[in-house]
Image: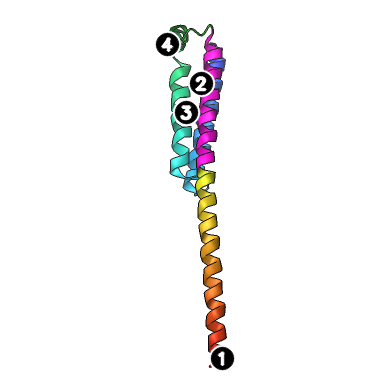
Amino acid sequence: MSIRLTLFILCISLIFLIYILRNVKTHTLSVRNSLLWIILLAVIILSVGSLPLLERIAHFFGIETVSNMLFFAGFLFLMFICFDCTKTISRQNEKILRLTQELALLEKKYEDDEKTGLEK
């Protein structure tokens, strides 16, 4: 890998890391969700300089080229992120349903209390 490409990848990774940390600081991204991205960036930064290690790992898994291995690893990472987002959406839907039911019960109780107060 050329020096220009290595420096480009490092610069993009550092810019993205700063962007993630800035979003965590402004509370637009939770620390829990940012950890996966920070770990991914750390792996990218560490792997940029170790092409022979990546070639050995690809050979170990029977993958012909490093680019195919990285593409597959990225695909698996995105599948994991999608699954995690799906779990979060499911939990949020359950909470919304519960809150809606509690709000309906409170509104009913409030209306009943108003009716009994007017009758007195």
Q: Residues within 10 Å of mark 3 (few under 14, many from 20)?
A: some
The mark tally for this picture is: 4
Element at label 2: helix
Q: Is residue 81 magenta?
A: yes
Earlier residue among tags 4 and 3: 3
The residue most toward the bottom is 120
Query: Which residue position is annotated with label 4?
Result: 53
Earlier residue among tags 1 and 2: 2
Q: Which residues are magenta?
A: 65-87
Query: Which residue position is annotated with label 1?
Result: 119
Of the two numbered discs 4 and 1 in the rendering, the one whose residue sits closer to the viewer: 1
Query: Which residue position is annotated with label 2?
Result: 73
Indicate left or right for 5 with 59 as reference: right
Under mark 1, the amino acid is Glu
Under mark 2, the amino acid is Ala
Q: Position of residue 107 (x, y in %)?
A: 56, 72
Of the two numbered discs 4 and 2 in the rendering, the one whose residue sits closer to the viewer: 2
Dominant SS in magenta: helix
Rounded to the nearest angstrom, the CA distance separating label 4 from label 3 is: 17 Å
